[in-house]
Amino acid sequence: MKLSLPSLLLGLCAAMALCGPAQAGNEARKVSVHKSAAVGKVKAAAPRTSRLRRVASVAQAPGQASFGQLQGLHGGADALALKSSVALVIDQDTNEVLFSKNPGAVLPIASITKLMTGLVVSEAHQAMDEVLTISQDDVDTEKGSRSRLAVGTQLTRGDMLHLALMSSENRAANALGRHYPGGFDVFVAAMNQRAVSLGMRDTHYVEPTGLSSKNQSSAQDLAVLVREAHRVPLLRELTTSQEAQVAVGKRMMQFRTTNGLVRNPQWDIGLQKTGYISEAGRCMVMQAQMAGRKLIMVLLDSTGKYSRIGDAERIRKWLGQTPAGSVRSLS
């Protein structure tokens, strides 16, 4: 049976009409499946992305700016490219200034404070074998810092002074102030009176540890303090001690210096002290012999955990590369 051309065309159109919706439905289902799978992958990945964002947020959160940063002291470059915003190097014998960078800036000095604490304690001539006790009053409520000296720990005044100067033990320094004749407030007053007697006009103390950012000074004043403290044999000995074993209760505890340069054979250090709180940055003062001279070095508000050490090394290398007697002052 032969069909006319119009009949054939009519049948073909009908067949396509029947098949089209089914194919279209299959394609729609395929698209829907692919889309659902993609959404599922995005949803599965979302928690990870969220975690990464939280971690990145924590990593990028800026730390508390130091007073030096807030004052813009890090904006200027210097000849030695130091990371410290304040630096001063002077000849101990002649008072010649060899390097100077913002020497009059008044900033928090952190545990450099303990150098004055040690000076006042040593000049009080109290018995170094007298046993002192760490109390709740010595616990840091300013910064919440930790200590290896638990409340109730008993040590001699000499051991307390050793740990305060070598290991920067805050509770030991505070206990020294409490056990001063007349008590804590009289001790702080004595610190300020001693600063005045030395002509340290930029210096003020409110406590003996350095945890308070209200303990402030300038590099010029601290150079005076280093010179005076270096005259005391006990302070020279304790600040340059590398380590010590101390009997704390029934245990022997090992304490070490906070200044790695003390252990470096390339350095001849006669007195030193380090310090750090966020408001002060990394700080360090030293009396040292190098390039045939006795020098006093002050570094304040250094950025980076090891930057003050790096700055001290830059200064040492600069002096070592310059022939004796021809060092030109840098500022």
Image: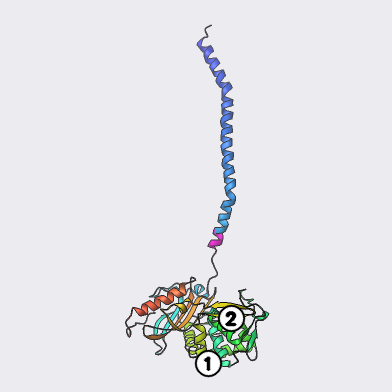
Query: Which residue sits at x=53%, y=71%?
Result: 65
Up/down of 297 relative to 305, above or below: below
The amino acid sitting under disc 2 is: Val
Q: Is residue 216 left or right of residue 95?
A: right
Residue 201 visible in the shown view: no
Instruction: Tell me which numbered mark, 2 or 1, is placed earlier along the sequence.
Output: 1
Please tell me whether mark 2 sits on a helix, a strand or a loop. strand
Given residues 209 and 281, the one toward you in this image is 209
Quadrant that contains the C terminus? bottom left
Please check the rendered image and state whether residue 86 is part of the magenta-colored stretch, yes or no: no
Q: Residues within 10 Å of mark 2 (few under 14, many from 20)?
A: some
In the rendered image, the residue lying farthest to the top is 1
Q: Position of residue 152 (x, y in %)?
A: 67, 80
| Alpha-carbon span between mark 2 and mark 1 | 35 Å
The amino acid sitting under disc 1 is: Ser
Q: Position of residue 13 (x, y in %)?
A: 54, 18
Q: Which residue is mark 2?
A: 246
Q: Position of residue 223 (x, y in %)?
A: 47, 85
The numbered dot on residue 197 is 1
Q: Position of residue 145 (x, y in %)?
A: 60, 74
The numbered dot on residue 295 is none
Image: magenta residue range: 56-66
Given residues 318 and 302, the one toward you in this image is 318
Up/down of 65 relative to 104, above or below: above
Q: Quadrant of residue 173?
A: bottom right
Please check the rendered image and state whether residue 64 is part of the magenta-colored stretch, yes or no: yes
Number of on-image labels: 2
Please tell me whether mark 1 sits on a helix, a strand or a loop. helix
Camera-nearest label, 2 or 1: 2
Residue 18 visible in the shown view: yes
Q: Residues within 10 Å of mark 1 (few under 14, many from 20)?
A: few
